[in-house]
Image (cartoon, rainbow, N blue to C red):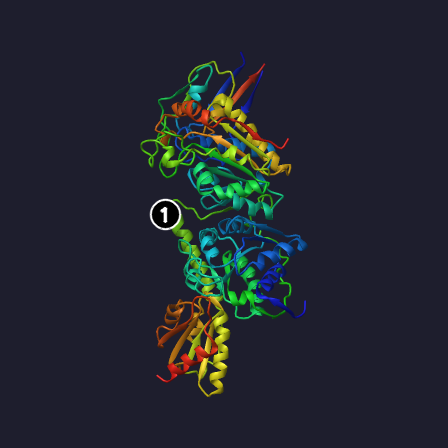
Amino acid sequence: MSEVKIYARPVSWMPDVSSHYCPGCGHGIAHRLVCESIDELGIQNDTIGVASVGCSAMIYDYIDIDYCEAPHGRAPAVATGLKTVRPDKIVFTYQGDGDLASIGMGEIVHAANRGQNITVVFINNAIYGMTGGQMAPTTLLGQKATTCPLGRDEKVNGYPIRVSEMLATLPAPGYIARVSVAQPKYTIKAKAAIKKAFQNQIDGKGFSLVEVLSSCPTNWGMRPVESFDWLISTMMPYYPLGTFKDFD
Amino acid sequence: MGRVLMKGTEAIAEAAIQAGCKFFFGYPITPQNEIPEYMSAHLPEVGGTYVQAESEVASINMVMGGGATGYRVMTSSSSPGISLMSEGISYIAGSEIPAVIVNVMRAGPGLGGILPGQADYLQSTKGGGNGDYNLIVLAPSTLQECVDLTQLSFELAQKYRNPVMVAADGFMGQMMEAVEIHPSATRDDPADTTWGLGFMGERGGKRSHLHSLFLTPEPLEAHNRRLQEKYGRIKETEQRCETYHVEDAELLIAAYGTTARISRSAVNNLRAEGLKVGMIRPITLWPYPTDAFQALPDGIRHILVAEMNAGQMIDDVKVATNCRYPVSFYGRTGGFAPSVKEIEDECRRLLAL
Amino acid sequence: MPKGRVEIHEKYCKSCGLCVAVCPTKVLRISEKTNTKGYRPVEQFKEGCIGCALCAVTCPDAAIEVFKTEE
């Protein structure tokens, strides 16, 4: 009989660092999946991350790779610049829904439309987290936020944007998938999708985006376990999981 | 390459290629479109890449990412486009990323017009974006200087890890003149692996992290102090200025760019009449050539600032001279440049006072 | 049943309880201890861990490492 470690803290996770995220925040899970992918693909020294603006602005404190900051929403443009000059490196952005789907909608659409060979990890938790729970472009109809205290009203605020479905209408992007971290069974699939999105870039295939449905217990006003239940019961019906586009 | 007749915008583009710039991120706006057009045609010949961005907001951020690798990158635009880039320029300066930005200035405000202007003087030299940062701003007055200053801008950007702007007005961009363009001595210099992104392996696994975000006050103030110390060094070492007939001048014209060309003609004509007129021409708009202004002779009775705007450089002249001389202004807006005769007439009026 | 055990890095744990909820054999609980951040870290309080690693898969703070005994 011998004991083996079957699950370890990722090597590319910054040693001896505790994240600033609230308890139960899905960002930490998604960060870990990115780290695990980087470790398993052996690309820690060759990966350049682009940090966006929002709760994950300080992702560079948690993943031990080269990092560039981007202004709010501009991460795909910064990544385009990096990848243009260093096509031999693996470049990825990590963006929330306020960053990518609101202020940065122009940059993500055009990076996708160019078929830019980058990887995008897009966290959709249906709210602005860092600024304190304001309505996001992804906030669900009827969902309360600090700037729609009575709930999102489509007559005033329009409808929540399904980014993956929208980008999948473009001919250039190769891989677009929506995953979730609400339960281990979803998280295991999310990991596979994120790893595949990096592998696509290594293989020179082109633009890959993984939308990760995640939680924001603090701004949703829920306990962590309850927030993941809400994600499954309320978010996932509007934002169905699946692969919307693939290279193959 | 011998002397060739070239348009200003194309001379700037070729000078950049000869300076080792292989990556250009552009967006169309008049009157600078020949720069991205030239780059899209000629960068592939040197193994480089032209990317057409979806906006100036995107192009400046592509420059930020490209420059973050340590390699030479560039963008160009004109006044309203530079306004859109201001956010990115602040981030680039705050993250200490080298970048070259050409502004072929047109008349404003707002959409303004497509004719030449110099009304981005304050935007370029005093900020534009948020926070305490400075751009190095170079103002060419001839097309040869467009070439030379474009090449210099890459050296300064790399040396100080700072964005550098070539502030050429629309006349500089659209006129033709004979120029000589030589490869820069540093054109094939390798990227700096000590901080450039993508060299983590070369650094033995030590990562580089370029950012302007410091959430706690102590490191942010320390970062600002370091930036200010750098700007201080740039002020000490990089001031550039031309003086023309200042030794015995009673009246001095202060002008840059196209207005300086016009003023030079006015000085020559007035000198032929026996009037003691000279000119001081800032080449670096930031750092402002304060040393040259401080060294001006006491015999000057008056300084006339001439610009294609409503009077944006006056304050800098007053500060640089400690208000030792009376300073007045003559300028045109809307796409007009002051004529030689207009400047001569204004000089005669001031000398008669 | 396979035999496993978890090692919880208490300093990283924020007692969100996600691991407690997903553990199929219910061997985890939030402890009475307090870590340096003021959270009460999770502990394995009884035998019965099967080394499935679902807790580690769901941990937002990479605070859990999992060991499995191979027969």
Q: Position of residue A37 (x, y in %)?
A: 56, 32
Q: Residue shown at 31%/31% (left/top)?
A: A150
Q: Residue shown at 40%/56% (left/top)?
A: B132
Q: Position of residue A144 (x, y in %)?
A: 34, 31
Q: Position of residue C2 (x, y in %)?
A: 54, 14
Residue sitting nearer the eye, B134 or A1: B134
**What amino acid is labelled 1 in the image?**
Pro
State which quadrant residue B2 falls in.
bottom right
Count of all numbered marks drawn on residues in the image: 1
A66 lies above or below A34: below
The residue singled out by tag 1 in the image is B217
Residue sitting nearer the eye, A93 or B342: B342
Q: Single out the residue that lies furthest toward the top.
A: C1
Q: Secondary structure at mark 1?
A: helix
State which quadrant residue A151 falls in.
top left
Q: Single out the residue that lies furthest toward the bottom.
A: B274
Residue sitting nearer the eye, B40 or A73: B40
Q: Is residue A76 left or right of residue B324?
A: right
User: Disc 1 is attached to a residue of which chain?
Assistant: B
C71 lies above or below B228: above
Quadrant for the C terminus of chain A, please: top right
Q: Is residue A183 left or right of residue A144?
A: right
A126 lies above or below C43: below
